[in-house]
Image: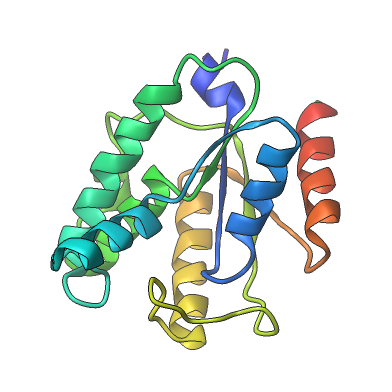
């Protein structure tokens, strides 16, 4: 039997610039609890203080901070009632750490809670992809990251649902219908 965390804590992952944050905002607008992406928060903090834990400067330090922040986020909302949606989180950070250091994702997540079995991934979407002050990677690196994430979620035996390239309201409805029809 799944515990509350497994049943109600849902990961939104996938390609950078693929619409995860926009989808998260739509789900929040509909009244669901959400957790913002650790990476963007870390980048904003590091830029503000002149730090080096940035994915384009020190990926290992960035990934380790993201793991800590994601674990703290999970602890903060672990007793939330109903669905909680995460824009990235622990698994994404563990994949980044593996990419930077070779430390297996399964080892990093060994004592961490599992999330809802179904994970929603946004695919690479070049028409909406943009770099900005917090996203420096080019589209091709975003595609490679997406492949690492897709492979990791499958290896960890999550059910992956790749969301279509459609309007955010339609995407949100697809996510909710998939989760609430079970």
Tell me where residue 117 sits by quadrant: top right
Q: Where, quadrant-wise, is the C terminus in this rendering? A: top right
Name the residue: 52% across, 78% down. Answer: 143
What percent of the width, then of the height, locates residue 134? 38, 71
Name the residue: 44% across, 71% down. Answer: 145
Q: Is residue 11 above or below residue 154?
A: above
Res. 160 visible in picture: no
Name the residue: 44% across, 51% down. Answer: 37
Name the residue: 29% across, 41% down. Answer: 69
Tell me where residue 165 sits by quadrant: bottom right
> With 27 as the anchor, is 11 left or right in this view?
left
What percent of the width, then of the height, locates residue 81? 60, 15
In the foreground, 55 or 150 = 55
Question: How many numbered tags mark residues here?
Answer: 0
Q: Is residue 116 above or below residue 49?
A: above
> With 2 as the anchor, is 114 left or right in this view?
left
In the foreground, 40 or 71 = 40
Q: Where, quadrant-wise, is the N terminus in this rendering? A: top right
What percent of the width, then of the height, locates residue 9? 55, 30
Q: Is residue 22 above or below residue 27?
A: below
In the foreground, 150 or 139 = 139
Q: Is residue 124 above or below residue 3?
A: below
């Amino acid at each position: 039997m799944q515990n509350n965390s497994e049943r109600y804590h849902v990961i939104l992952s996938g390609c950078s610039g693929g619409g995860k944050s926009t989808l998260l905002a739509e789900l929040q607008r509909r009244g669901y609890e959400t957790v913002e992406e650790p990476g963007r928060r870390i980048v904003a903090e590091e830029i503000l203080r002149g730090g080096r834990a940035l994915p384009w400067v020190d990926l290992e330090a960035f990934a380790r901070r993201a793991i800590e922040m994601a674990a703290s986020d999970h602890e903060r909302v672990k007793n939330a009632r109903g669905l909680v949606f995460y824009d990235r989180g622990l698994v994404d950070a563990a994949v980044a750490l593996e990419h930077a250091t070779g430390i297996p994702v399964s080892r990093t997540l060994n004592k961490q809670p599992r999330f809802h079995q179904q994970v929603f991934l946004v695919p690479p979407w070049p028409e909406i992809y943009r770099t900005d002050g917090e996203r420096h990677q080019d589209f091709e690196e975003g595609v490679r990251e997406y492949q690492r994430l897709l492979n990791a979620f499958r290896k960890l035996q999550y059910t992956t649902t790749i969301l279509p390239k459609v309007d955010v309201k339609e995407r949100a409805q697809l996510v909710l219908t998939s989760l609430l029809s079970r």
